[in-house]
Image (tube, grey):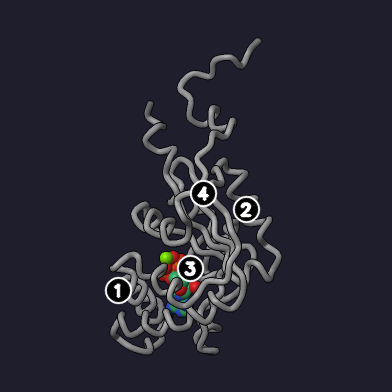
Amino acid sequence: MAAEKFKNERSLIVIKPDGVQRSLIGEIIRRFERIGLKLSAIKMLVPRNEMIEKHYTVDPEWRRITGEKAIKGYKEKGQKPPSEDPYEITGLILERLKKYMSSGPVVAMVWQGAHAVKIVRKLVGGTEPFSSDVGTIRGDFVMDSYEMSDGDERCIRNLVHASGSIEDAEKEISLWFAKEEVIDYRLIPEQIFYDVNLDGLLE
Ligand code: ADP
Ligand code: MG
């Protein structure tokens, strides 16, 4: 069955402290539920600095990629980046991320389903809310921009974290959840998404 290969994909989502404070927990969960993803783990916690650093560096390339993305962003706007070294920039971002992510409770979740990683990223939108698409979580519920966050020397507040790749997702899930906290169960509507034959619909 072709769907078999896709339906077990998982993504780690974290509703960041601003998402909790804005009372958007329900709204964010609703968007993942209504597309048909399955919630397989959920908890509320205040993450510690060590955990935040581990989380953002599960991908050994994150420091380079995020730094390069930031430098490109400055140049596209005709601005001078604070450094030409992507690692120096991510060092700064990481310090700001620790302050931001540990400022209050967050809600960590595992969502499972076909193409979960890419589907979730599509629903979440681009990193900077100011330029992320209308209809996405970041585009619909927050106005923050790099200009504002840089001006105040803080992290961009974009409500939610979502895994960037299948490999990152698996590493992040084992960082945030113990094995027994992730529940493997059948969600009845999965039949309509994944079963080859829709037998038994008619009496
Ligand atoms: P995403 O969360 O979209 O995957 P990244 O993995 O590149 O984005 O960065 C992780 C988080 O770090 C972002 O969600 C954001 O909160 C913060 N961040 C990233 N780049 C910047 C930046 N240039 N300025 C401020 N904060 C940033
Ligand atoms: Mg990322």
Q: Nearer the viewer, residue 124 or 143?
A: 124
**Kind of residue indicated by mark 4:** Trp
User: Ligand 1 within 8 A of label 2's CB?
Assistant: no
Residue picked out by circle 4: 111
Label 3 residue near ligand 1, CB within 8 Å: yes
Q: Residue at x 55, y 89 (%)?
A: 152
Callout 3 environment at 10 Å: few (<14), some (14 to 19), or many (20+)? some
Q: Residue furthest top?
A: 203
Q: Quadrant of the C terminus?
A: top right
Image quarter of the N terminus: top left
> Which residue type carries mark 1?
Arg
Quadrant assignment for ligand 1: bottom left
Query: Disc number at residue 29?
Result: 2
Q: Is residue 81 above or below residue 180?
A: below
In this rendering, is residue 108 above or below 57? above
**Tag of residue 64:** 1
**Picture residue at 51% right of the left edge, 80% below the top:** 155
Q: Amino acid at mark 2?
A: Ile
Say which label, 2 or 1, has the lower sequence index. 2
C-alpha gap between disc 4 and disc 1:
27 Å
Q: What is the distance, in whole Å, between disc 2 and disc 3 at their CAs? A: 19 Å
